[in-house]
Image (cartoon, helix red, strand yellow):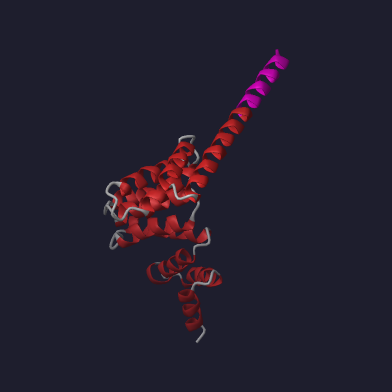
Amino acid sequence: MIIKKQILLLLVLLSSAYSNSTVDAKISEYESKAFYHETIGEVDLGLSYHMKACELHNGNVCSNVASSYFNRREGNAGYIQKALKYYRLACRLGNVYACTMTAEIYIREMKDYDKAFDYYDKVCELNYGEGCYRVAWFYYNDGANNDTYMQQALKYFKKSCSLDNKNGCTLTARLYEVDIKDKEKAHLYYQKACKLHGETACGILKSWKL
């Protein structure tokens, strides 16, 4: 019985590997056709092959489809919506850039700050420091006289700093310096920000030595 189960598991794994390799081959085929048609100036036909590859759930390809629409949005009604559709799809497939662009479109094009916040939060979940920094800013800007918001701002600034975002380190330091009155911790975060080439942090550390 144990041997039968092991054989069945092996067959399942082999089937999965074969399925993945088949999908990858199909994506490569579509992408090759897309690049060929783009090279000879048939941009829309090339895009149609990128879209076929995207339908096979490849986040990078879906993000490229979105960028194609986004970069040609001027004078093309509906392209921004198409860009958003494919960026959102790519984001669901774990593409960090697509999640960031989704948030940017919601802010800059649609002024929908709640949805932008959700997508920046997704970027942060994917361990990209800039996403955590943007989430922190939402809390920080709305945090006047709100201790809960300021705690959340500090939490996300610290996470962005842990992911080597120099601005996140600088703002973490500032919260410790100005709001929490813990100059020792502020110094540590200014030091890290400075090491990450944060000019503001380096300037503050220099002034403290005077």
Q: Is residue 121 visible?
A: no
Reply yes or no: does residue 5 show up in magenta: yes
Question: Could you tell me residue 113's position as x and y percent?
Answer: 29, 53
Residue at the right extreme of this rendering: 3
Residue that appears at 31% across and 51% down: 106
Most common secondary structure along the magenta stretch: helix
Quadrant in which the N terminus is drawn: top right
Indicate the position of residue 51 as horizontal and vertical percent values: 44, 39
Q: Given the current orientation, which residue lies at the most extreme front position?
A: 40
Total tally of numbered discs in the picture: 0
Identify the residue at horizontal 68%, vertical 23% (top origin). 10
Q: Does residue 73 appear in this view?
A: yes
Residue 173: percent from left, percent from top: 45, 68
Q: Which residues are magenta?
A: 1-16
149 with respect to 18 (left or right): left
Would you place residue 115 above or below residue 13 in this image?
below
> Vertical placement of 84 versus 131: above or below?
above
Looking at the image, residue 187 sits to the left or right of residue 145; the answer is: right
Q: Is residue 174 magenta?
A: no
Residue at the location (55% across, 42% down)?
Answer: 32
In front of the other: 49 or 123: 49
In the rendered structure, the answer to whether residue 140 lies left or right of residue 131 reads: left
